[in-house]
Amino acid sequence: MKKTWWKEGIVYQIYPRSFNDTSGNGIGDIPGIIEKLDYIKSLGVDIIWLCPVYESPNDDNGYDISDYRAISKEFGGSEAFDRLLKEMHNRGLKLVMDLVLNHSSDEHYWFKESRKSKDNPYRDYYFWKPSNTNNPPNNWVSFFSGSAWLKDDNTNEYFLHLFTKKQPDLNWENPKVRKEIHDIVDFWCQKGVDGFRMDVISLISKQLDFPNTPYPEDYGKTIKNYYANGPRIHEYLRELNEKVLSKYDIMTVGEGPGIDLSNGLDYVDEERKELNMIFHFDHMFIDNGPGGKYDPIDVPLSKFKKVFSDWDDKLKNKGWGSIFLGNHDFSRMVSRFGNDNKAYHSISAKLLAMLLLTMRGTTYIYQGDEIGMTNVAYPSIDDYNDVETLGSWNEALKRGEDMSKFLKLVHRQSRDNARTPIQWNTTKNGGFSNSDPWLKVNPNYLDINIENQEKDENSILNFYRKMITVRKENKVLVYGDYECINEEDENLFIYRRRDSEESYIVLLNFSDSYQTIEHNKLNLDATQIVISNYIEPYSTTQLRPWEAQLRRYYN
Ligand code: ISL
């Protein structure tokens, strides 16, 4: 496949609210990011994906934009942003903005106008529906609980909001809306940004007859078949590409609930000229039980491995993948896919780092994962902030559930797990802020923090640095073919990466116990160790708990 910077580059995702507060208001800000650019650069990453920093009433922490061209004053405004971009480019770092184009804030000028009257010129910027009964136009439920429709008193009509009621869905059918969007994207390209992560891009084209979902209780299936992958989605993406994106050397990654193996390639097939990459969620929703996210189930390792194998197979030689195990919407990856008990915390976090950095596809590292930040367990629901968590809590309350049990589920599943402030050092609030943070710091900051790990040669942080160097120096880890060796095994994940010249093998023990390696098949005597998460000595017959080895075959 064609080689490019965004295939080889490693992305570091920043959730600005939780990164570093320099103004002392308990909220992270852009000057706080600038202050830490040398740290970010020292990781060896190339690209920063910045979660939304636009003007926003923050009903969903910036994913509700009220002005697409303005930077939030709370974060430091446009002056700070321009400085950030310059300072990043000076260091050879690229900036990917988060674009939220499926919906705006209800405080955006367009919506304020739109709701005024049925004949307002902005009326068709959103989806308005009459309802003769006192029920919403259909049975769609919002991602954050409750009907996806809200009746507006001004005109007595309902508008569509797939997320909170302060996030009305934009009507991409309207050519004026698409023109506005093209201009916004062009505005940021002109400013010199290097790419976009496009929020819920799979939802932008709607089924205009808004049919009822026949299976409202199966939310995943409803999203896939009713909300996502609408009839004009690929037309809109091609148009955006042709009119704006193709004119710049930028990268794009579309986020997509409802994207699966049957339709994923359509978004990223290089010949189709739509997006460069997508985030699918096949491995991220893998533990959702019949009742969804708050009904988690145990997942066999074979199922997890199959997601990686199937997607690699689907995309190979045609499109490019994104490799990630966490972001601001999910629990912490070490708590979820590793083991955050003290005995295995460090070793399993390093194993996951090796997975992230030895798969085919662009690697995305979420802030804090480079030191193995873990889930948090706040004692009370009042400590939580996330709209999704609070929505689910209220639904459970209505259903009459045992709320002390539900709090345990919140501990495991809440998006706030990933949003606790970055743990810089052992000072008050983990060095994040000198006043009370908007979301409490995880009390384990005294143990797990960047300053401690800087000093320790064998820390998770320094393992990330070494792994990043290894990936950079061995392009076969970026472009080479991927082959899983042991699909059925429920403890070990073993795969090869190779091209015509070189061959590597990755051995990952996803268990708390010793595991024997089926040696014959692998010919490990013909390999040498490149890097491991244990300190020597290595064995080629057995892997210790959570041991991870990268080996190269002698030529
Ligand atoms: O967060 C989720 C599950 O925990 C997802 O269902 C998530 O809502 C979905 O992937 C869309 O996420 C994106 O759009 C949302 C925003 O709240 C998320 O932070 C964002 O990543 C609405 O803009």
Image (spheres, rainbow, N blue to C red):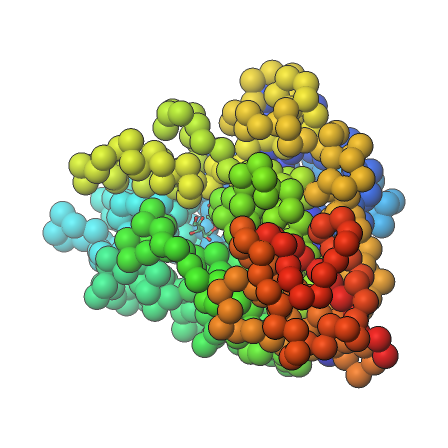
In the picture, the quarter occupied by the C terminus is bottom right
Residue nearer the viewer, 124 or 516: 516
In the displayed structure, 540 sits above or below 316; it is: above
In the picture, residue 422 is in which quadrant? top right
The percent position of residue 362, horizontal first and vertical second, equals 68, 62
Residue nearer the viewer, 282 or 456: 456
The percent position of residue 39, horizontal first and vertical second, equals 79, 38
129 to the left or right of 449: left
The percent position of residue 520, horizontal first and vertical second, equals 66, 78
In the displayed structure, 213 sits above or below 47; it is: below
Q: Residue at x 28, y 58 (%)?
A: 290
Furthest-bottom residue in view? 500
Q: Residue at x 36, y 36 (%)?
A: 408
The percent position of residue 214, horizontal first and vertical second, equals 21, 66
402 to the left or right of 413: left
226 to the left or right of 357: left
Q: Residue at x 63, y 24 (%)?
A: 446
In the rendered image, is residue 172 in sight?
no
In the displayed structure, 25 sits above or below 417; it is: above
In the picture, the quarter occupied by the N terminus is bottom right
In the picture, residue 314 is in which quadrant? bottom right
Q: Residue at x 59, y 65 (%)?
A: 516
In the rendered image, is residue 407 in sight?
yes
Total residue callouts = 0
